[in-house]
Amino acid sequence: TILLGYTPYKITHSSDYFDQLYTWAIELIKKGLAYVCHQTADEMKGFNPQPSPWRDRPVEENLQLFEDMKNGKIDEGAATLRMKITLEEGKLDPVAYRVRFTPHHRTGDKWCIYPTYDYTHCLCDSIEHITHSLCTKEFQSRRSSYYWLCNALNIYCPVQWEYGRLNVNYTVVSKRKIAKLIDEQVVKDWDDPRLFTLTALRRRGFPSEAVNNFCAQLGVTGSQSTVDPSMLEAFVRDYLNNTAPRRMVVLEPLKITIENFPHSKPIAVSVPNFPSKPELGNHDVILNRTIYIEKSDFMEVRSKG
């Protein structure tokens, strides 16, 4: 992302390819590798479900029904287009298209059928000539459908590589879970400073270099890992220690008068801009009889312990 110092070659959207995806769906039907099914979502759930009774319906009938889906003649939930493949974990015939009478934020009301992740992911990667498709481990079970679909259409097939998800204690990093928090108004948006999204970190002032250093130190692994937020904050401190000139601020000032101040007038005290790098210069701090300290640094009665 631009936030982290990387400029993308091009920003694309799956909806850019809706026409091509539809054309390929028709090709799958003609090859006998996809069919229109009327099972409900509950009937398709779980592992090793019963095959659809519509799995072997004629190609011409599938083509007509899929066109009816596209033209809005079939209700939501009444039909899906499914691919004839058994996934690695035993799931049978993943859905490729669903009926949704909801305008798309980029294509408007042109479509009332929308492709699923299982169908869209590999095909968009192929269109864009992606060499390696990187995703987290929970998508490993989709690898078989990824390769099957590209090969079934006889198109260029990228390589899918999985890596372990990085979790952060005391927060959520799943897009699905964050979206639910936003929908339920628990947080305001993706840049809510309570989150650990990149936009939220930017809003909190986290330098991109610190985030990059944090990720580089962790590395890429196949196992899922969990870190404490303090680890990222440590990288922020290390970065700022070498890049941010020292300045002082009192957030809750308490006025103090030094009665035995040894000077008749204010004096300038030279302090380094970077304590560990004195060669980078100094700046003056004016010391007077009246100073201000943090209110929390003063107490009339010492606390026990």
Image (cartoon, grey):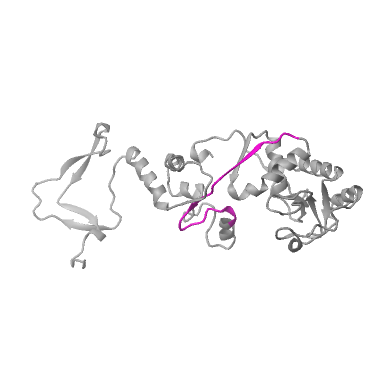
Q: Is residue 183 left or right of residue 97?
A: left
- Residue 84 lies, in percent from the top left, at 79, 49
Residue 235 in magenta?
A: no
Q: Nearer the viewer, residue 282 or 206?
A: 206
- Residue 178 lies, in percent from the top left, at 56, 56
Q: Is residue 303 left or right of residue 127?
A: left
- Considering the image in quadrants, where does the C terminus appear? bottom left
Q: Is residue 182 left or right of residue 42?
A: left
Q: Nearer the viewer, residue 211 or 259?
A: 211
- Considering the image in quadrants, where does the N terminus appear? top right
* Residues rendered magenta in the picture: 155-176
Above or below for 139 versus 46: above
**Total marks in image:** 0
Above or below for 194 versus 300: above
Above or below for 103 versus 300: above
Q: Is residue 225 left or right of residue 127?
A: left
Q: Nearer the viewer, residue 138 or 176?
A: 138
- Residue 266 falls in which quadrant of the image? top left
- Residue 42 falls in which quadrant of the image? bottom right
Q: Nearer the viewer, residue 221 or 132?
A: 221
- Residue 232 lies, in percent from the top left, at 41, 48
- Residue 265 falls in which quadrant of the image? top left
- Residue 235 lies, in percent from the top left, at 39, 44
